[in-house]
Image (cartoon, rainbow, N blue to C red):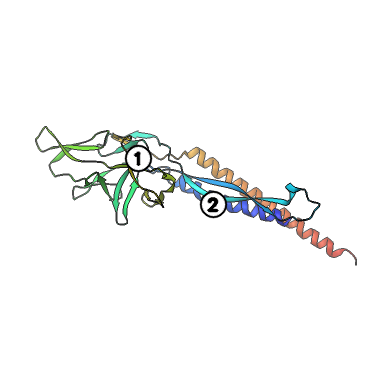
């Protein structure tokens, strides 16, 4: 009976962690460029029975172990905004931004121009080009961002394009090692190095939405809640059974 309690408790601990992951996904289902997290579990076998009359398979107790979470980097749906500063990335690349903590990476493409003429994210971080921050002049208008990331404008009354920079797009050989930070940013994990990405393309006037499927995540939340409740009921029954057995043993005459 003690094994039943321990196995049930291990499952409840895993469900609690899974609920945290699902809740965070739901909270970010309207965050542009957000990538969902998924839970990864494995079976943990523990041998506690040692009597010779137990069959080999009965000596092992199977627990549930919360091994890790991983990022779902699948492409999210795109939405046309017709805003010339909105960009969606077709491919596995990331935009590079400058933060107080160093370079960070994001898929959030609703860009802006700050009061210093710099191209920034919605959180105010500078978007880096291949030659550093991208800066506009006061007379610039008709911003055009080409599929390869080149940013050009019309300057004043000129009808000739003026280049302001080229968006720096990078990808990672081991993207799962990227670490999520606030403001929809990723920090480089251990052993991760950004590599120039020449295959991804930019779509101007579009935004990549979150890849969270709200219906699926809500279904998972309901499933987790029901499973947790069922295990709690099972553990209570085992506890009552244990208590009843002790009471009956106490009534056995000497």
> 249 left or right of 147?
right
Q: What residue appears at the point 54 percent right and 40 percent down from the top-left corner?
A: 219
Cα–Cα gap, marks 2 and 1: 29 Å
Which image quadrant for residue 29? top left
What residue does disc 2 label? Answer: 17
Placement of the C terminus among the 4 image quadrants: bottom right
Could you say which disc has been placed on residue 93 in the image? 1
Of all residues, the one furthest to the bottom in this rendering is 254
> 244 left or right of 9?
right
Q: Please report whichever mark, 2 or 1, sits nearer to the chain's N-terminal start.
A: 2
**Counting other residues with Cα less than 10 Å from the Cα at mark 2, is it few (<14), some (14-19), or many (20 or more)?**
some
> 166 left or right of 67?
left
Report x, y in % for residue 33: 37, 42
Q: Nearer the viewer, residue 195 or 156?
A: 195
Q: Nearer the viewer, residue 197 or 33?
A: 197
> 5 left or right of 120?
right
Q: What residue appears at the point 38 percent right and 52 percent down from the top-left corner?
A: 182
Report x, y in % for residue 202: 30, 35
Q: Judging from the image, what secondary structure is the residue with disc 1 in?
A: loop
Q: Are marks 2 and 1 in contact (CB under 8 Å)?
A: no
Up-down: is 74 above or below 69? above
Of all residues, the one furthest to the left in this rendering is 157
Q: What residue appears at the point 12 percent right and 33 percent down from the top-left corner?
A: 160
Report x, y in % for residue 173: 40, 42
Report x, y in % for residue 57: 73, 47
Which image quadrant for residue 9? bottom right
Could you say which disc has been placed on residue 62 in the image? none
């Amino acid at each position: 009976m003690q094994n039943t309690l321990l196995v049930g408790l291990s499952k409840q601990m895993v469900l609690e962690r899974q609920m945290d992951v699902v809740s965070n996904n739901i909270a970010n289902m309207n965050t542009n460029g957000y990538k969902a997290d998924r839970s990864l579990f494995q079976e943990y076998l523990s041998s506690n029975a040692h009597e010779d009359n137990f069959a080999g398979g009965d000596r092992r107790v199977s627990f549930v172990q919360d091994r890790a979470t991983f990022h779902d980097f699948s492409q999210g749906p795109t939405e046309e905004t017709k805003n010339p500063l909105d960009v969606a990335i077709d491919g596995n690349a990331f935009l590079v931004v400058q933060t107080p903590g160093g370079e960070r990476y994001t898929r959030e493409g609703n860009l802006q121009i700050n009061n210093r003429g710099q191209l920034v994210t919605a959180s105010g971080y500078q978007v880096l080009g291949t030659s550093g921050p991208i800066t506009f002049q006061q007379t610039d208008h008709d911003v055009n961002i080409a599929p390869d990331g080149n940013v050009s404008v019309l300057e004043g009354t000129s009808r000739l394009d003026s280049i302001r920079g080229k968006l720096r797009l990078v990808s990672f050989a081991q993207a799962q090692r990227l670490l999520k930070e606030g403001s929809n940013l990723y920090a480089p994990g251990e052993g991760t190095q950004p590599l120039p990405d020449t295959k991804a393309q930019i779509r101007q006037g579009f935004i990549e939405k979150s890849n969270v499927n709200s219906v699926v995540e809500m279904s998972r939340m309901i499933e987790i809640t029901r499973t947790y409740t069922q295990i709690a009921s099972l553990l209570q029954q085992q506890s009552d059974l244990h208590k009843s057995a002790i009471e009956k043993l106490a009534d056995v005459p000497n």
